[in-house]
Image: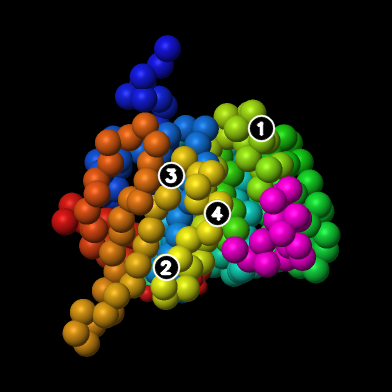
Amino acid sequence: MMTPKQVERIESGVTGLDELIEGGLPAGGVHILAGGPGTGKTIFASQFAYNAASKQGKKVIYATFEESAEYFKRNMKMFGMDFAPLESAGTIRIVDLDALRGKELESNISLLLAALEEIDGRILIIDSLTALLIACETAFELRSFMKIIYRSVKNNNITTLMTIGTAQSGKLGPETFLADSVLMLENWLDDFELKSRFVVLKMRGTNHSRKYHSVMISQDGMHVSKY
Ligand SMILES: Nc1ncnc2c1ncn2[C@@H]1O[C@H](COP(=O)(O)OP(=O)(O)OP(=O)(O)O)[C@@H](O)[C@H]1O
Ligand SMILES: [Mg+2]
């Protein structure tokens, strides 16, 4: 039997983070990145995707819902991540779910699963799950969506990162109970300055940091500090 320590880990791509979580995100897990507006969820998710595809040679499906694929790529280029060559090489596929807005939820799910199968994707990013779930008209639809996604990724050992937009209260939904880990980004006001911090709320099989860590975003992307 494998002990948790032997579980393969996928580097987060966010400098400073892996040492807080025993080397990276457990492979094959469903990971949730929660945070308020503008806390850096998309930057984090793209660093994870970019690092896995460019440094670890993993096949990645990046589903974007809130931003078009073109806007996303242009924006991330400013942080030194050029997705175009990875896309041409077939290492990463950016799926523009926004283009399907208003369509049946099933169309979104089938598109994702087909894309994963076509390139034999090992990593799935959904940015954001919140936007996708708003498209669910009933609680039943939402539950079936989560079930299908969880079953497919777990059966195929696909490492999944989904972002969730939280309101200021930071209340998390039931999807976080199913997840293997929950990472949280927060903006907070320190006197007259808006600061950002990061905390790992849970990560199964991992002796993770339980502290808040400062987050810096610069033109080199996101960095999580030791303290
Ligand atoms: N060049 C930069 N240097 C420093 N910080 C930046 C830079 N560009 C963007 N930011 C910060 O990154 C934040 C946006 O990051 P990102 O789009 O990843 O957030 P998000 O959590 O995905 O937002 P949303 O809730 O809109 O989806 C901005 O609010 C800003 O604070
Ligand atoms: Mg975003």
Q: CA distance from mark 2 to mark 3?
A: 16 Å
Q: CA distance from mark 2 to mark 1?
A: 35 Å
x then y, percent, for residue 145: 71, 50
Among all residues in the image, which is located at the extreme left?
227
The residue indicated by pointer 4 is 174
The amino acid pointed to by label 1 is Asp
- Indicate the quadrant where residue 123 lies: top right
Looking at the picture, tell me which residue is in the foreground, 115 or 133.
133
SS class, disc 1: loop
The residue indicated by pointer 2 is 170
- Image mark for residue 120: 1
x then y, percent, for residue 55: 42, 38
Q: Is residue 91 above or below residue 141?
A: above
Task: Mark 1: give few (<14), some (14-19) or many (20+) Cα within 10 Å.
Answer: some
Task: Mark 4: give few (<14), some (14-19) or many (20+) Cα within 10 Å.
Answer: few
Q: Which residues are magenta?
A: 130-145
Looking at the picture, tell me which residue is in the foreground, 84 or 184.
184
Tell me whether the residue at label 4 lies in contact with that at label 2, contact meaning CB atoms closer than 8 angstroms: no
Q: CA distance from mark 4 to mark 1?
A: 29 Å
The amino acid pointed to by label 4 is Pro
SS class, disc 4: loop
Tell me whether the residue at label 3 lies in contact with that at label 4, contact meaning CB atoms closer than 8 angstroms: no
Tell me whether the residue at label 1 lies in contact with that at label 3, contact meaning CB atoms closer than 8 angstroms: no
In front: label 4 or label 1: 4
Q: CA distance from mark 4 to mark 2?
A: 13 Å
